[in-house]
């Protein structure tokens, strides 16, 4: 199609990088020295079937889907900056002009798709060498590349974390120098990169780089507040920043669920504001799980993460994260296990995965003991779940039944009776059966001075 139109075309960017790294990629970017939108429309119509083209005229780009591939087209651009304006003049340019204005040398590689040079690699900034050496480096002076789009500072860290690359010292210094400029970037774009770091194989790498560059302090100060191991009167507490990163690395091989990984990030976030030193007890973080769960919505809002059931799930795991480990410290009673199953519901397995990752003591013997106890809790959970089916369980007598039995309107009394029934069942004092729960309800109501509408034997 390009040849027919008489314009050169190249495949460029992430697809070429991933080709050399042997990582599969479904997004293919094409750059043409001509009109990208026109070429996209021509290419789309050359395939059988209907392939609607989305056009982004402001950016001069267009894209369409072909099966599971996403094909994006852009005209090669050149940008020139005026010293008195941040907004660049964008005009059409050569392939090399376009490569120059990309973020990193490894993302500026292009391969010709033109007849006379098909398959030729165009690599003006030694991107292949950087790929081989594992280096993230900007094609131009990094101050220019980052001022063009400050999100690229996060992208540098993200690629370093994802690919196990190192950031070139000059590029790295420029990130530290320009970190404050990340403030002009939207929360959505920042969290997209942060999520990719969290989903990488060893997320601590990315977090440490963000911290070193001064970016973490700006985008997520609550996390930086976890830093510091304090000692008073010879009593110390661990550094919760490094502890949290260890938990995150430990959970990574066990889950690709972004939100479970977020729960690991946030499980101890309530520690700094609840930290106290009590002379008789040493350091305490009483209620940090409750405080932490309360902090989740603010953090999600700040990072433009979804304020929906995903957030509720993270909150729930943060608030319950001490429960399984608490169980191992006392005797594992049936009623405690039932309660945990009831409170965690379907998220019990994820909670256990989180808690297991949370065991990071340096004392090997202690870790072994905890893990052994954990195996026991898991076994007990399995047994009780099989017997009582408490996941997503609802007490057999509902609020409606209670209201009907005593002729009540919705109100406090209904709640009190409902709770009493639930607690009695969870404690193992009452069988999980409608008839038994119904008579228990009548007794509870009578204790409160309520009179059932129907005679008991009717
Ligand atoms: N790009 C850039 N600056 C940005 C974003 C993107 O220069 N802030 C360029 C890079 O050349 C990049 C290409 O646009 O390779 C495509 O960007 P994108 O699809 O966001 O990233 P990929 O490099 O494809 O990587 P991934 O798919 O892992 O996000």
Image: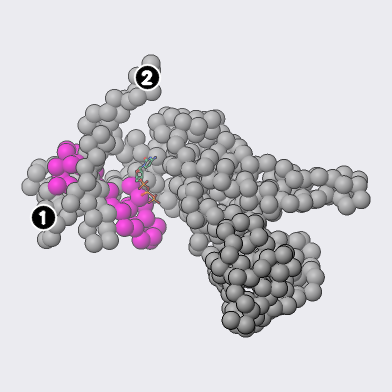
Q: Is residue 285 left or right of residue 347?
A: right
Question: Quick check: is 343 in the magenta stretch?
Answer: no
Q: Would you say residue 374 is visible in this rendering?
A: no
Question: Quick check: is 34 in the magenta stretch?
Answer: yes
At a point 50% along the width and 55% down the height, the residue shown is 310
**Which residue is outermost to the top?**
84
At a point 53% along the width and 40% down the height, the residue shown is 302
N-terminal of the two: label 2 or label 1?
1
**Which residue is outermost to the left?**
4
Q: CA distance from mark 2 to mark 1?
A: 42 Å
Q: Is mark 2 within 8 Å of ligand 1?
A: no
Q: Would you say residue 408 is visible in this rendering?
A: yes
Q: Which residue is mark 2?
A: 85
Q: Nearer the viewer, residue 6 or 430?
A: 430
Q: Which residue is mark 1?
A: 46
Q: Residue 289 at x, y = what percent?
A: 69, 53
Q: Nearer the viewer, residue 401 or 229?
A: 401
Q: Quadrant of the C terminus?
A: bottom right
């Amino acid at each position: 199609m390009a040849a027919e139109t008489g314009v050169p075309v190249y495949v460029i960017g992430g697809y070429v990088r991933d080709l050399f790294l042997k990582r599969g990629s479904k997004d293919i970017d094409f750059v043409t020295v001509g009109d990208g939108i026109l070429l996209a429309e021509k290419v789309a119509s050359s395939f059988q079937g209907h392939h609607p083209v989305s056009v982004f005229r402001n950016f001069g780009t267009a894209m369409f889907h072909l099966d599971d591939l996403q094909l994006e087209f852009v005209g090669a651009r050149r940008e020139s900056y005026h010293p008195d304006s941040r907004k660049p003049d964008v005009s059409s340019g050569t392939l090399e002009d376009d490569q120059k204005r990309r973020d990193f040398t490894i993302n500026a590689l292009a391969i010709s798709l033109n007849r006379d040079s098909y398959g030729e690699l165009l690599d003006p900034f030694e991107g292949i060498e950087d790929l081989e050496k594992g280096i993230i480096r900007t094609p131009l002076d990094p101050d220019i590349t980052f001022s063009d789009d400050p999100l690229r500072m996060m992208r540098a860290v993200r690629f370093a974390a994802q690919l196990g690359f190192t950031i070139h010292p000059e590029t790295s210094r420029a990130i530290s120098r320009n970190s404050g400029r990340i403030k002009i970037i939207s929360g959505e774009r920042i969290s997209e990169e942060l999520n990719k770091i969290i989903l990488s194989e060893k997320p601590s790498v990315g977090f440490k780089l963000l911290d070193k560059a001064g970016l973490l302090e700006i985008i997520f100060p609550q996390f930086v507040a976890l830093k510091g191991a304090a000692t008073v009167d010879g009593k110390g507490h661990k550094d919760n920043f490094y502890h949290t990163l260890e938990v995150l690395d430990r959970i990574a091989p066990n889950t690709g669920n972004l939100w479970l990984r977020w729960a690991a990030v946030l499980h101890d976030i309530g520690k700094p504001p609840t930290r106290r030193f009590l002379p008789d007890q040493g350091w305490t973080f009483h209620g940090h799980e409750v405080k932490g769960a309360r902090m989740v919505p603010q953090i999600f809002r700040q990072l433009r993460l979804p304020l929906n059931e995903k957030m509720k799930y993270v909150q729930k795991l943060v608030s319950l994260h001490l429960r399984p480990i608490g169980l191992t410290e006392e005797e594992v009673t049936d009623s405690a296990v039932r309660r945990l199953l009831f409170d965690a519901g379907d998220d019990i397995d994820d909670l256990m995965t989180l808690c297991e990752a949370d065991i990071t003591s340096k004392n090997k013997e202690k870790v072994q003991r905890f893990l052994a106890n954990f195996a026991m809790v898991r076994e007990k959970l399995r047994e009780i779940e099989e017997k009582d089916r408490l996941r997503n369980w609802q007490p057999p007598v509902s609020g409606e039944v209670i209201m009907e039995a005593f002729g009540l309107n919705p109100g406090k009394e209904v709640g009190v009776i409902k709770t009493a029934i639930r607690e009695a069942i969870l404690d193992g004092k009452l069988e999980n059966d409608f008839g038994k729960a119904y008579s228990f309800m009548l007794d509870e109501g009578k204790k409160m001075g309520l009179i059932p509408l129907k005679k008991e034997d009717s």
